[in-house]
Amino acid sequence: MKNTEQELEFSIDQIPEPEDIQEVIFSLMVNPNLAPVNYFNDFSEEAIDPSLMAGDDTNESGIFEIDGSGEKVAMTTHAMHKYLAQDPQQTTELLVSKAARKMVCFGAKPVAVSAFLYHINVADVNGQAIASGSKKGLENVAEAYGLKISDRKIRFDNAMDGVAVPPTLIISMLGEIDDKKPLLTPSFKNKGNNIFVIGRFHDDVAASEYLQFFHEMTLSTLPVCDIDVEKQLHEVMDDLHTKGLIESASPVGVGGLFFSLLRAGMPNGLGFDITTDAETRKDAFLFGEAMGRLLVGVNPAKEDEFLDFMSASKIPFFNLGHVTRGEIRIDDASYGYVDKMAMNIEA
């Protein structure tokens, strides 16, 4: 199914719910944008070191020590070109929110952001609209999250005449590290740890890799993104870090929940056994990229305290399942093992 409409009107009802989730997983495994987990395809006889893949604790965190003094800072960079021309304000708000959510998962506090617009002609009316919308979005989200903005707010790189390159926004974010607060990594730590999602699920697959790669719909609305919800997540994560109630944390990101779980399991060769939500379409639950969701691992010894805290916080959360020794199970069905997944799918 290909979308040729120029108007960004989209509903999940426009696409059929797949009958075979395994087929979706197999298809998305060869998506270049999900390359961090593509080593499952086993294209060579050589073993792949998971520590070299995105999702590795050291590479993913973006945490750096300054000049050997022990003082640390966090930094992350994100880019986006899809939908920037159609809705520059919301795209900018989404991009900065994504960077901030990633940072708070590690235990850092976002403090500053800068932005750069590439391939844009500010002499053109469309270029001016993109620049104006991006600037407004940057100001909105910076005010909401208490971020400082670099001096010129958005810097420009004028597009070359005759070169059809989509406008692209790149943002960089700097975060503070509190040496009294434990830092976390995205990876699952131990078999038997409980897995929770903090945030609300939506019947939303807009702008997802699933929608674009599996259903071949290249245009849609942007995924759900609510700045007020993001702010609440920042506060909850700060308390969870301070109280030491979680052992791993990562945002639900590119590829949706399923690929976020894979990225969390890969470094230590761990799998997951999860149950989907009957009130949410399974494809949206597993592959939707709606914002405002965090994936956390909780030691069973801390589960009661975690549940008490989350119940008092009034933030929606979902008991997803638990970490396994390596098997991947969804709704009591086995999808193979984390290190042999492609083999099991092909079989």
Image (spheres, grey):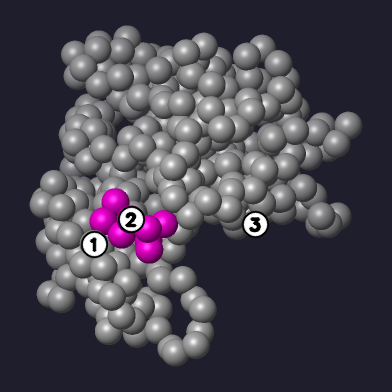
Residue 133 spot, x, y in % from top left: 23, 62
Q: Which residues, given as a range, are shown in magenta?
A: 83-90
Q: Mark 3, residues whose alpha carbon is within 10 Å: few (<14), some, or many (≥20)?
A: few
Per the image, the residue denoted by label 3 is 32
x and y percentages locating residue 282 in the rendered image: 57, 22
Is 7 located above or below residue 280 in the figure? below
Q: Three-letter amino acid code at disc 1?
A: Gly
User: Badges 1 and 2: C-beta atoms under 8 Å apart?
Assistant: yes
| Residue 304: percent from left, percent from top | 32, 10
Q: CA distance from mark 1 to mark 2?
A: 7 Å
Name the residue tied to disc 2.
Answer: 87
**Is 15 in front, or is 184?**
15
Q: Which circle's residue, 2 or 3, is located before the other in the chain?
A: 3
In screen coordinates, is 21 left or right of 260? right
Q: Is residue 270 left or right of residue 166?
A: right
Element marked by disc 3: helix
Q: Which residue is mark 1?
A: 133
What's the residue at 40%, 84% (across, down)? 159
